Amino acid sequence: MSPLPSSPPNPFACIAAGIACLWGPAHGGANEAVLTMLKEIGSKDRVNEIVKRARDPNDNFRLMGFGHRVYKNYDPRAKLMRETCYEVLDALGLGDDPLFKLAMALEKIALEDDYFVSRRLYPNVDFYSGLIYE
């Protein structure tokens, strides 16, 4: 009996399937939505304005990359992704990148502010992975 399957998988099809499984705004697009949001905010000087909008129930603005439908506390994957994010950006010499500084200002608020903590709106894995992909 042959150890190979009757139809060996095509490596190109397997790679394409792996990429396609993250398709869409709720999965692979979530980290892209974080980047889009950060670019729209533009500067850490606008963080207070953005936080005010995020708290306003009458404003449609949403902070992307915060909270998670399944993880009701801190996303356990986010801890590792956060460390990786810092390592990658440091290795690339991007620790002073304005987008990264903006993201870290939002992260600080989300981890310390009573509004976000009480609602368990912690940065999730998509918040950090978007920065790495950028």
Image (tube, rainbow, N blue to C red):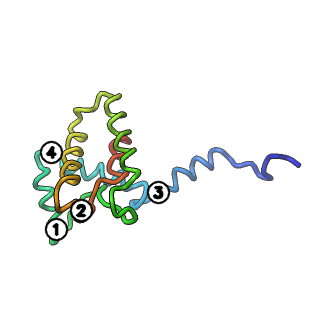
Counting residues from the start of the chain, the first of labels 3 and 4 encountered is 3
- Neighbor class of circle 1 (other Cα within 10 Å; few <14, some 14-19, many 20+) is few
Q: Kindly check if marks 1 and 3 are in contact, taking CB atoms under 8 A apart as contact.
A: no
Q: Is residue 105 left or right of residue 66?
A: left
Image depth: mark 3 or mark 2 in front: 2
| Distance of label 2 from label 4 (alpha carbons) | 17 Å
Look at mark 1 in the image and give the residue it sits on: 59
- Residue 23: numbered disc: 3
SS assignment at label 2: loop
Report which quarter residue 11 is drawn in.
top right
Q: Is residue 14 left or right of residue 74?
A: right
Against 60, residue 6 (above or below) is above
**Residue in view at x 39 percent, y 55 percent:** 29
Q: Is residue 121 left or right of residue 59?
A: right
Against 108, residue 118 (above or below) is below
Image depth: mark 3 or mark 4 in front: 4
Counting residues from the start of the chain, the first of labels 1 and 4 encountered is 4
Which of 134/77 is in front? 77
In percent of width and height, residue 17 lies at: 57, 53
Which of 11/116 is in front? 116
Against 75, residue 93 (above or below) is above
In percent of width and height, residue 36 lies at: 28, 51
Q: Kindly check if marks 3 and 2 are in contact, taking CB atoms under 8 A apart as contact.
A: no
SS assignment at label 1: loop
Q: Disc 2 marks which amino acid?
A: Arg
Look at mark 2 in the image and give the residue it sits on: 62
Q: Disc 4 marks which amino acid?
A: Lys
Q: Disc 3 marks which amino acid?
A: Trp
Which of 61/78 is in front? 78
| Distance of label 3 from label 4 (alpha carbons) | 30 Å
Quarter in which the C terminus is drawn: top left
Q: Kindly check if marks 3 and 4 are in contact, taking CB atoms under 8 A apart as contact.
A: no
